[in-house]
Image (cartoon, rainbow, N blue to C red):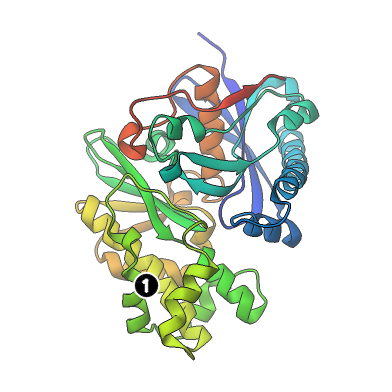
């Protein structure tokens, strides 16, 4: 029998709030989470990444400097993680480092995650797996989402149709059918527009608990206008990000509604996220028995309440009730995907991404 192996995962998502690091013990098809560490993303780095979503002066230089700064956070989180688990770097088979997505254009044949994997391998003394999305895009896929296969391993139950909702800056669904089929796609904005709007009008990093949105009133005409965006009606495979749902998109949507109360806009954005998620679930898995929610958006209680109202009898539960903290899930997925790469096993699900077939994902930088 082969001994269990250790893999780490590093993730910073579209919310741009923090770097999460997890340590997984993998034993065949079984896995166990051994630890977690987190580093907050400095505001200056968050602003740099937001700016890199669009063309700008000297952006290649700025992207490389941002990669180096992100690498520092990766190293700090990784060292804290290993120290807390009493694990030495040489005991870890590999680190899966997702990088920070700054451009995602599978329609043009590319996706770009800012990262410095060679420098990370040098600094931490561990083999690094990075650039997970490009091979799927090269094979004609969306390159996203890549987490549904891990969601199946973590949450799937034979004979039960259930959905896993990753509620980050962008919301994405993994649809795990009881007969073994898997679908998945990005629904649209999760918390990214909400965070940007509360930062602009209240100077806060996020709307804690969704309290501001909960205190205001949804604007039905604005909501209908936003839901008219063609992305929401598109069939999967589909993926999106800040390239589409950004502050410019929001300003464009609000142009016909000059003078709208900022609090009411916040409430409308929360309702937009809830309605678009619920509509996708009803359309693509009408028999869902449960929605397991993970990601930082689990802390937005107002958004979860709106989602529950939209879904009616379908229970909405936090992933912590299914054995894993919501903040740990996505980093754990990339630790799991790193193991797939090291073992030369496919990491994508063609039915999810639209790729021409299964592919081994990630570039490997040996220790």
x and y, in percent, of residue 16 in the image? 62, 56
For the C terminus, give its image quadrant. Answer: top right
The reply, left or right, for residue 81 in relation to residue 340 is: right
Q: Residue at x 47, y 56 (%)?
A: 170
| Extreme residue in the front direction | 57
Can residue 156 be spotted in the picture? no
The reply, left or right, for residue 355 in relation to residue 86 is: left
x and y, in percent, of residue 35 in the image? 64, 38
Residue 204 quadrant? bottom right
Task: Relative to 121, say whether 326 is above or below.
Answer: below
State the count of labels.
1
Can residue 22 be spotted in the picture? yes
x and y, in percent, of residue 125 in the image? 76, 24
In terms of secondary structure, where does tag 1 sit?
A: helix
Task: Relative to 356, say whether 2 is above or below.
Answer: above
Task: Relative to 135, say whether 175 is above or below.
Answer: below
Residue 81 quadrant? top right
Q: Residue at x 67, y 57 (%)?
A: 56
In terms of depth relative to the viewer, which is nearer, 261 or 288? 261
Q: Residue at x 42, y 66 (%)?
A: 304
Q: Residue at x 52, y 43 (%)?
A: 330
| Extreme residue in the bottom direction | 259
In terms of depth relative to the viewer, which is nearer, 94 or 105? 105
Which residue, given by chain and number where applicable, does mark 1 sit on? 226
Residue 48 quadrant? bottom right
Number of residues whose C-alpha sits closer than 10 Å to that of mark 1, classed few (under 14), some (14–19) or many (20 or more): some
Task: Relative to 81, say whether 361 is above or below.
Answer: above
x and y, in percent, of residue 127 in the image? 68, 23
């Amino acid at each position: 029998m082969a001994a269990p192996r250790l893999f780490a995962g590093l993730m910073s998502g579209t919310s741009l709030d923090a770097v999460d690091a997890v340590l997984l013990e993998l034993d065949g098809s079984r896995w166990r989470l051994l630890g977690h560490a987190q580093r907050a993303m400095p505001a200056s780095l968050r602003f740099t990444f937001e700016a890199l979503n669009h063309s700008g002066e000297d952006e290649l230089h700025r992207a490389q400097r941002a990669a180096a700064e992100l690498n520092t956070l990766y190293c700090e989180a990784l060292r804290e993680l290993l120290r807390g688990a009493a694990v030495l770097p040489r005991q870890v088979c590999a680190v899966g480092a997702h990088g920070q997505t700054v451009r995602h254009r599978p329609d043009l044949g590319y996706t770009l995650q800012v990262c410095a994997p060679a420098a990370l391998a040098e600094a931490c003394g561990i083999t690094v797996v990075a650039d997970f999305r490009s091979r799927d895009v090269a094979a004609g896929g969306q390159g996203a989402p890549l987490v549904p296969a891990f969601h199946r391993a973590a949450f799937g139950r034979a004979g039960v149709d259930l959905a896993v909702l990753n509620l980050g800056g962008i919301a994405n669904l993994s649809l795990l059918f009881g007969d073994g089929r898997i679908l998945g796609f990005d629904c649209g904005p999760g918390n990214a527009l909400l965070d940007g709007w509360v930062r602009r009008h209240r100077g806060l990093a996020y709307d804690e608990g969704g309290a501001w949105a909960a205190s205001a009133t949804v604007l039905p005409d604005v909501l209908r206008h936003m839901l008219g965006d063609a992305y929401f009606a598109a069939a999967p495979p589909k993926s999106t990000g800040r390239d589409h749902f950004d502050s410019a998109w929001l300003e464009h949507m609000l142009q016909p509604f000059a003078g709208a109360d900022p609090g009411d806009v916040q409430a409308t954005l929360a309702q937009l996220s809830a309605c678009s998620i619920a509509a996708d679930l009803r359309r693509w898995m009408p028999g869902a028995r449960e929605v397991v929610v993970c990601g930082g958006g689990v802390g937005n209680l107002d958004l979860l309440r709106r989602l529950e109202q939209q879904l009616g009898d379908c229970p909405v539960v936090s992933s912590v009730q299914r054995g894993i903290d919501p903040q740990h899930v996505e980093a754990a997925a990339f630790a799991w995907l790193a193991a797939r790469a090291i073992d030369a096993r496919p990491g994508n699900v063609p039915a999810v991404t639209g790729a021409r077939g299964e592919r081994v994902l990630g570039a490997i930088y040996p220790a």
